[in-house]
Amino acid sequence: MMKAVAVFPARRQVQLIDQPEPGIQSPTQVKMRVLDVGVCGTDREITSFQYGTPPDGSDYLIIGHESLSQVVGIGDQVTKANTGDLVVLTVRRPCPHPSCVACRSGRQDFCYTGDFTERGIKQQHGYLTEFVIEEESYVTVVPRELRDVAVLVEPLTIAEKSLAQLRAVEQRLPWGRQGHRNAVVLGAGPVGLLGAMALIVAGFDVTVYSRSSKHEEKNDIVSAIGGRYIAAETHSVDEMAEAVGAIDMVYEAIGASGLAFDVIKHLGANGVFIFTGVPGCNRPIEVDTDDIMRDIVLNNQVILGSVNAPPQSFQAAIRDLGVFMQKWPQAVRALITARFPLDQATQALAPGAGGIKNVIAVSA
Ligand code: BGC
Ligand code: ZN
């Protein structure tokens, strides 16, 4: 038997449970011992029963989708990983419909039908358990020197997929990114800070605008990577926009729609605004839609949403994380606030747990 952290939505309980240890069932599967699992806002929504769906026929869902693990066994036909390798796993799995060209192309991050599943989130058990089995196509090997920080790969893939989308959009301008330098990151959580690092490495001048109360800690990290930190507490959106000048791209990682739409108003000519947050359902607010629509048209702006990430973005994230560790090892390490043992997982998941990224160290 092995331990796992499961949410029982109908009973409104989050519990450490015993599960039979799984075994390899097909020649293309990999068996892994889970080392680290990161906790994010999605996990907190699931464990407060607002989001997440157990597998069909199960009354519980094993949570966890940000993982680092070590391969302990491989099927006969596995070529991408070997016993002992450190690996990260993608999250989304394809829908079953033959007509879904996205899922049939291995790009379930663009699933048309909505019948995709997600490990630890939607109808598939996740990684907050001692052992997991997965098809090798969802496994990516991580260099050993990234052991301490590789649990950040999955949240970084959100930025990597966004950057890939941005590059595709930039193709509409014959001069590409030239003259496009000012990026604003909304939010200074892990997704925002990792996004800021990725944007700086990609050549942007980055301003992080944040509502966090931990100004000093966030400011230190952003300054260390060569970005500018502006706190919402001391600067309105108008003041932030004034300080930045023409905003060429916005990477939204705050999940607050009101603030995001305030910033859209300040997007510059040919600007791209990328949403990655998934807000809860709050009361509607008033937005000057005429103003925004006029600007979108007259300034050729692009507003796009980006979710989940394909294996290519996991590879990009692993490469970039290596670059970040060369340039700013302390700032990257500072993103991981605390490690909790598996039997204290519920503490790491508590709404007031604080910190930037809490990690559950499932095994050493
Ligand atoms: C995960 C994504 C997932 C999204 C929506 C995020 O926390 O990182 O992989 O698609 O939640 O469920
Ligand atoms: Zn997450």
Image (spheres, rainbow, N blue to C red):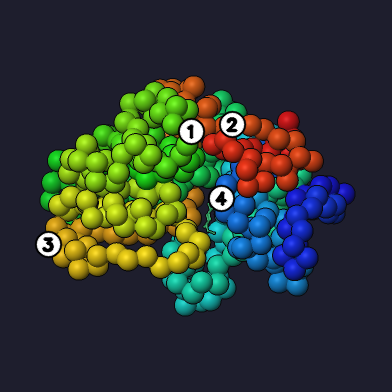
Amino acid of disc 3: Leu
Is the CB of the residue bearing disc 4 within 8 angstroms of ligand 1? yes
Kindly identify which numbered label has been placed on residue 298. Answer: 3
Q: Position of residue 102 (x, y in %)?
A: 44, 67
Question: Helix, strand, or loop for circle 3?
Answer: helix
Residues at marks 3 and 4, CA–CA distance in whole angstroms: 36 Å
Quadrant of the rendering where the C terminus is positioned: top right
Give the mark toward the camera: 4 or 1.
1
Which is nearer the N-term, disc 3 or disc 2? 3
Image mark count: 4
Classify 305 as above or below 185.
below
Identify the residue under disc 2.
Answer: 337
Q: Position of residue 222 (x, y in %)?
A: 39, 29
Is the CB of the residue bearing disc 2 within 8 angstroms of ligand 2? no
- For the residue pair 130 and 80, the one nearer the viewer reads as 130
- For the residue pair 118 and 21, the one nearer the viewer reads as 118
Q: Residue at x 30, y 44 (%)?
A: 236
Identify the residue under disc 4.
Answer: 41
Question: Helix, strand, or loop for circle 4?
Answer: helix
Label 3 CA crowd tier, 10 Å (few <14, some 14–19, many 20+): few
Q: Residue at x 22, y 51 (%)?
A: 267
